[in-house]
Image (tube, rainbow, N blue to C red):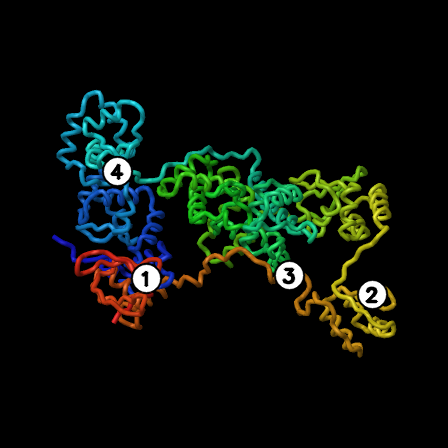
Amino acid sequence: MADSLRSLADSLRRFDDTRLAELLGAREDLLRPLPHGIGALAARAAGALSARRALGSLTAAELAVVDALAVLPEDTSPTAVAELLALGAADLAPHLERLRTLALLWGEKELHLVHAVREGLRSPAGLAPPHPEDPSADEARDLVAHAPTALQGPLDSLRWAPGRLARGSGTLASQLEEAGIARADGPDALRIPRSIHLELRGGHLHESFPAAPPDPGGTEIRERIPGTRTAGAVERALDAVRVLDTVLTWDDENAPGVLRRGGLPQRDLRRLAVEAGAEVTTTATVLQTGWLAGLIGHDGETWAPTADWVDLWRRGPESRWAELVLTWAHSDHLATIVGDADATTTPRAALSEATRVEQAATRRHRLLHLLAEHPDRDVPSAGLLAALSWWYPLVPARTLRQDVDALLAEGNALGLLDGGALTVLGHALVGVLDADLPTADAALTDALTSHAPAPVDEVLLDADLTIVIPGRPSARLEALESWTEVVSRGGALTLRATAESIGGALREGRDPEAFLELLREASSSPLPQALEYLVHDEQRRLGQVRVGSALAYVTGEEDALALLLAHPGAAEAGLRRLAPTVAVATCEPRTLLRLATAAGLSPLIEGQGVRLDSRGPGVGRTDHLVRAPAQVPASATPDLATAITRLRRAEAGDGSPSVMDRLLEAAGSALELDLGIVDGRGGVETRRAVPLAVEDGRLRARSSEDGSEFTVLVHRVTLD
């Protein structure tokens, strides 16, 4: 008995709101832009690009069912599919229902695979594409039954092998051809006809049905000292923040450059890693994530922190870590492939689109959930790869291997993983993967805060100029690293003051007395005399020429400058006289202009490079920096409930559909239309045709007169 359904559109019209929400949630591309009605939705779902994207989300079990549908003829039955897969009807039913929900299949007793899917799977389950000269099922059975005994071994090997073979240099190829088992497929290849291959497989498509993902394996986690894994995770999390804080302190003299094609030069990445005392992978992970979070940008020549970084820095290290982790979890970029060659053999640069891998975030979420399902195991990378291959069988193995390697390396760098197991911070992330960003940010900030040790605000001083901070440094003690060299990190931070480190800090304009006073306040023991001598000796040695900073200058008569310097606002503006007729200030030129006017003077701005903006200090050029391309904002995809309501209204006839929507509706329902096609001279030719697909601004249709197919640009189509 034939189904009452005539098309995919009819099938979707039977969906209730819950099932329609499941479809739109799984295939978000169908919502951008929102179609005008169910018919238009069906046409878009049946399009080649959208269908191919949906195929990429299928598991190995679902793909096996699609393979069977692609092998069997149109209008096949569930019974035939079950027989081909050696499955029971009850085991097959959930997979068919899932494919119907994804709009890849329609029909109940007569199953119809979406045309674009059938056309896209040319070699389902490794079988060769169909050929007009392929033998029938009976002929194939006879050929296999009468194959020479000498070929039984090779035929057993070919049973589950791909249907296209290299000819090779031996005699086996000619023997297979003579027996009718294989046919020539070009000068260097053979193909096993699909009917023969199915006969070799005993009428089944797969050796065994991949019903569930393989167990990833792994060893049981045992801690000698309870809490060491959590302590290590917190240490790596805070170290990632330290790396970010350190690398973003560059000045204009040593700011990293920008490649012509975009991105950070590899030499600058290695230099920043050395300066931060971190591995290149860790530095790349932190920098790449900071760039994606909008904390770093460039002006075409050099990279610089953005205003967002200034705001985030004020919120504390726990908040900075939460920002990094959430950005990392939801991005499609892999920092571990920085330096690898792309398709053009060009090395991939950090802070560039070259590290983007399509759907990487989706697969990262899957891996994180997989690890969360095995909380007491250290899962090996091979086990993760095998499981990920089941969830994404159509994704190339090399890409999946990159996903796994990136998760392990980058997750460890951020404190989320310890080897192949989630840490307490990693479990906190998995718990908020689907939460809104404010909720997730607060939860992760609290997770790190609750497990991190309290900051230490004391130091231990030694006569050999060693400074030990016995724990996590407080905010004010972090400044000590600017004056010292790091000896070791871990449970305690060990620093040592040297002539080079003290000289470097002095050259950067840091205050030596403030450094010594900080040590006096933080230490319970007296300041070593050798340290004071070292600081003062370096201060005298470097004090031959002094350099300061100024944002504005003023020139004028000596009396006019005296009047300006006497104004109450002069001190706040940092105004000081350099010569009888010259003074400089640490404020912006506009502030100095207002100060001069308030002092009763008549100021005049001079110089081509003077900025007269009213932004606060510390912003500078950050407002004009080029940042990472934004992800598709949530606002670009309508809320599912809203989208379904609008679809239902459009289906009920509310609103006027556009030409595109009407074409999509017709394609989804196989309706004939009178198409007006505008030619190059402005004339209109009318053709009666059935729209087949609308993609990339083109309409593919079949003429109702002669059955020929043609393609035309949508903007050249008119409808009465």
> Circle 4 is placed at which residue position?
128
Q: Amino acid at mark 2?
A: Arg
> Going 29% across and 23% down the picture, which residue do you hit?
170
Q: Give the spatial CA distance, label 2 vs label 1.
A: 70 Å
Q: Quadrant of the C terminus?
A: bottom left
Of labels 4 and 3, earlier in sequence is: 4
Of labels 3 and 1, earlier in sequence is: 3
Residue 33: x %, y % from top left: 37, 63
Q: Give the spatial CA distance, label 2 vs label 4.
A: 85 Å
Of labels 2 and 4, earlier in sequence is: 4
Label 4 secondary element: loop
The mark closer to the camera, 4 or 1, is 1
The mark closer to the camera, 2 or 1, is 1
> Circle 3 is placed at which residue position?
621
Q: Are marks 3 and 1 in contact (CB under 8 Å)?
A: no
Label 2 secondary element: strand
> Circle 1 is placed at which residue position?
713
Q: Give the spatial CA distance, label 3 vs label 2.
A: 26 Å
> Would residue 381 appear left or right of 451 to someone viewing this image?
left
Q: Amino acid at mark 4?
A: Ala
Q: Give the spatial CA distance, label 3 vs label 1.
A: 45 Å
Of labels 2 and 1, earlier in sequence is: 2
The mark closer to the camera, 3 or 1, is 1
Q: Residues within 10 Å of mark 2 (few under 14, many from 20)?
A: some
> Circle 2 is placed at which residue position?
576
Q: Are marks 4 and 1 in contact (CB under 8 Å)?
A: no
Q: Give the spatial CA distance, label 4 vs label 3.
A: 60 Å
Q: Amino acid at mark 3?
A: Arg
Residue 280: x %, y % from top left: 59, 41
Residue 83: x %, y % from top left: 19, 39
